[in-house]
Amino acid sequence: MSSIAEAESEIIEEFELFDDWMDKYNYIIELGKSLPLIDPQYKDDAHLIPGCQSQVWLHAEMNDGKLFFRADSDAIITKGIINLLIRVLSGHTPQEILSSDLAYIDQIGIKEHLSPTRSNGLVSMIQQIRGYAQRNV
């Protein structure tokens, strides 16, 4: 498994392949389609991320000192966004997750191209992931 920094660099390189934001949106949609399925038992209120415009469920599981995430959403763009987060943070220790600055989000320009409600949802997703990490330090 690659480090958080390596995964971030990979994503930055992928986004640099696209010239305009419509292509980047389409890529995010494709990422949403490839999001690994969450077990249906976790699509409940206890795993729902508050503050998101669409419904987003996130489940974390600790295994050998590392957190592994699964998620789903009822909106394809949101599925792509959560996939970008999970791809970078899943499989790392809680401390690594808490120490990451997630600078790649700003570097790929995603925040500035999201609606304010989707941008707030992104922040909520990050807070939820960090919350899981904090509880498992």
Image: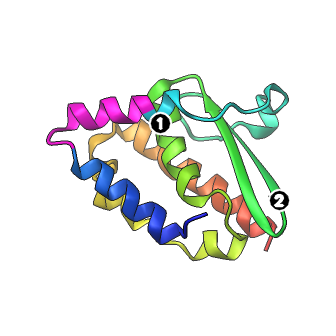
Question: Is residue 9 covered in magenta?
Answer: no
Q: Is residue 30 visible?
A: yes
Give the quarter of the figure containing the N terminus. Answer: bottom right
Q: Quadrant of residue 70?
A: top right
User: What's under tag 2, amino acid-wise?
Assistant: Met
Q: Quadrant of residue 35?
A: top right
- Residue 7 relative to residue 44: left or right: left
Q: Is residue 53 visible?
A: no
Q: Nearer the viewer, residue 51 or 78?
A: 78
The answer for how far apart the CA atoms under marks 2 and 1 are is: 23 Å
Q: Viewer-proximal residue, 32 or 131?
A: 32
* Residue at the far top in the pictured view: 74
Q: Up-down: is 29 above or below 4?
A: above
Query: What residue is shown at x 65% (from left), y 53% (from top)?
Result: 128
Q: Is residue 22 magenta?
A: yes
Q: Which residues are magenta?
A: 18-30
Q: Residue 94: image x %, image y %?
A: 71, 70
Give the amino acid at mark 1.
Gly
Q: Quadrant of the C terminus?
A: bottom right
Q: Which mark is residue 43?
A: none
Give the image location of residue 99, x and y in percent: 58, 77
- Contact (CB < 8 A) between labels 2 and 1? no
In the picture of the structure, the residue carrying the numbered disc 2 is 62
Q: Give the residue number, with chain letter if any, for mark 1.
A: 80
Please, what is the dominant secondary structure of the magenta stretch? helix
